[in-house]
Image (tube, rainbow, N blue to C red):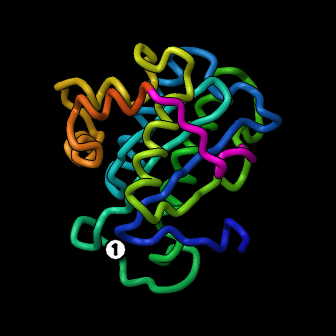
Amino acid sequence: MEIRGTHLEIDKFYHIFNRGINSKLTFLSNENYNYFLQKVKVYLVPYFDIYAYCLMPNHFHFLLKVKSVEEIAFSEKKSGLHSEDGFFSKAIGKLISSYTQSFNKVYQRSGPIFESPFKRIHIDSDDYLRNLIVYIHQNPENFHTYKFSSYSAIISNAETNIMRKDVLELFGDRENFIQCHLKEINLNFVKDF
């Protein structure tokens, strides 16, 4: 099935990822990373629970759960561009578009910086979920100290938009979460990325 025809469904988990066109850099400075994360709060937090993320110089990964109907107010529109079916994909598209517009303005360029459409994989088991969280966090070589992933937020007590409690429960506790991250994860589903 074509990606654009695959709608994100309420109460489901998804691995959302994308890379720069021709694998070019999409984040050139700390300010770029921080701006993208600010836009995540605007465009994703109202509609998704964030379980993990990692921003790399030429790509990003998110593990998101679409919030329940009770947590989100929808219009009554049931079909077309602004229907409930495409609503969540559109929120992610707005994040990417907003960041791209700012990036282009700062670096005096034009055109897209990310491939289109963004990639999405439905996560259908807790085992898959746990392995994916570790995989996302292990993207940078020194993930323990990497600033632009959710790993540090999950093991700390600082305020965060990450679903820390839920993530730690998936692993049993904080210590097991840390231990699982010391093992190498090799997931076949990302081979094309």
Q: Is residue 105 visible in this depiction of the protein?
A: no
| Left or right position of 38 against 154 | right
Question: At 82% across and 35% down in the image, what residue appears?
Answer: 22
Find disc 1 in the rendering and name its residue: 74
> What segment is highlighted magenta in the picture?
183-193
Q: Residue 98 at x, y = what percent?
A: 55, 42
Q: Residues within 10 Å of mark 1 (few under 14, many from 20)?
A: few
Q: Main secondary structure of the magenta part?
A: loop
The one nearer the camera, 173 or 108, is: 173
**Split into 4 quadrants, where in the image is the C terminus?**
top right
**Split into 4 quadrants, where in the image is the N terminus?**
bottom right
- Mark 1 element type: loop
Q: Is residue 61 visible in this depiction of the protein?
A: yes
Question: At 20% across and 37% down in the image, what residue appears?
Answer: 173
Q: What's under tag 1, amino acid-wise?
A: Phe
The one nearer the camera, 104 or 85, is: 85
Question: At 28% across and 73% down in the image, what residue appears?
Answer: 69
